[in-house]
């Protein structure tokens, strides 16, 4: 089967792949805030909910700008490592790209929890937007 064919997700695909498809739709600020928060609690669903609650004015001890700043610092550290990793061949399937990029990230960066893997994978796949936002620090 060619990587450029459109396919629906298989029922036995990992849930992390579907989480990844959702994360790819977030803007750079929300991705970076997720990276920042993932350092505190490494569950991708809880991190996504907390970032969304912050965006809608929830009163948490952490402000959105502090999370974004923390996420930018973490992104810059990890990005340097990923830039030297073997590239992931492009494909027409977002799910396949997600799986391959996630595998590359986990082999290149040690000791990442599931939320960090999810958000950093999304940042790598959306690195042009994320790098632009990170440069505005």
Image: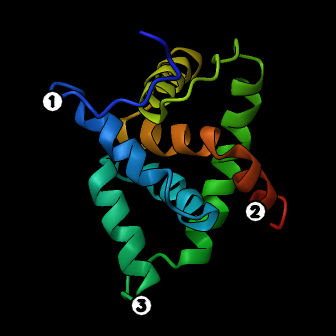
Q: Between marks 1 and 2, how big is the CA–CA gap?
A: 35 Å
Cα separation between marks 3 and 2: 21 Å
Question: Nearest the camera: 27 or 82?
Answer: 27
The residue singled out by tag 1 in the image is 11
State which tag comes first along the sequence, 3 or 2. 3
Q: Tell me the quadrant of the picture where the C terminus can be found.
A: bottom right
Look at the numbered disc 3 and give the secondary structure of its residue. loop
Question: Which numbered disc, 3 or 2, marks the residue closer to the eye?
Answer: 2
In the image, what residue occupies the spot 47% across and 19% down?
103
Left or right: 84 as drawn, with respect to 108: right
Q: Are marks 1 and 2 in contact (CB under 8 Å)?
A: no
**Cα–Cα span, label 3 and label 1:** 36 Å
Q: Is residue 6 left or right of residue 136?
A: left
Q: What residue appears at the point 53 percent right and 22 percent down from the top-left corner?
A: 4
Depth order, front residue of 54/23: 23
Residue that label 3 marks: 57
Q: Which residue is mark 2?
A: 133
48 over 4 or under it: above or below = below
Name the residue furthest left.
Answer: 11
In which image quadrant can residue 7 be found?
A: top left
Question: First in sequence: mark 3 or mark 1?
Answer: 1
What label does residue 85 carry, if any?
none
């Amino acid at each position: 089967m060619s990587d450029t064919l459109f396919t629906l997700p298989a029922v036995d695909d990992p849930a992390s792949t579907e989480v990844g498809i959702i994360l790819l739709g977030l803007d750079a600020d929300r991705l970076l805030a997720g990276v920042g928060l993932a350092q505190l609690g490494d569950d991708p669903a809880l991190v996504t909910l907390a970032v969304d609650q912050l965006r809608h004015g929830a009163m948490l001890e952490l402000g959105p700008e502090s999370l974004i700043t923390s996420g930018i610092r973490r992104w810059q550290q990890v990005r340097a490592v990923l830039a030297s990793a073997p590239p992931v061949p492009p494909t027409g399937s977002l799910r396949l790209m997600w799986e391959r990029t996630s595998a590359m990230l986990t082999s290149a960066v040690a000791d990442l929890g599931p939320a960090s893997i999810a958000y950093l994978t999304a940042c790598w796949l959306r690195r042009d937007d994320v790098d632009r936002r990170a440069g505005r620090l």
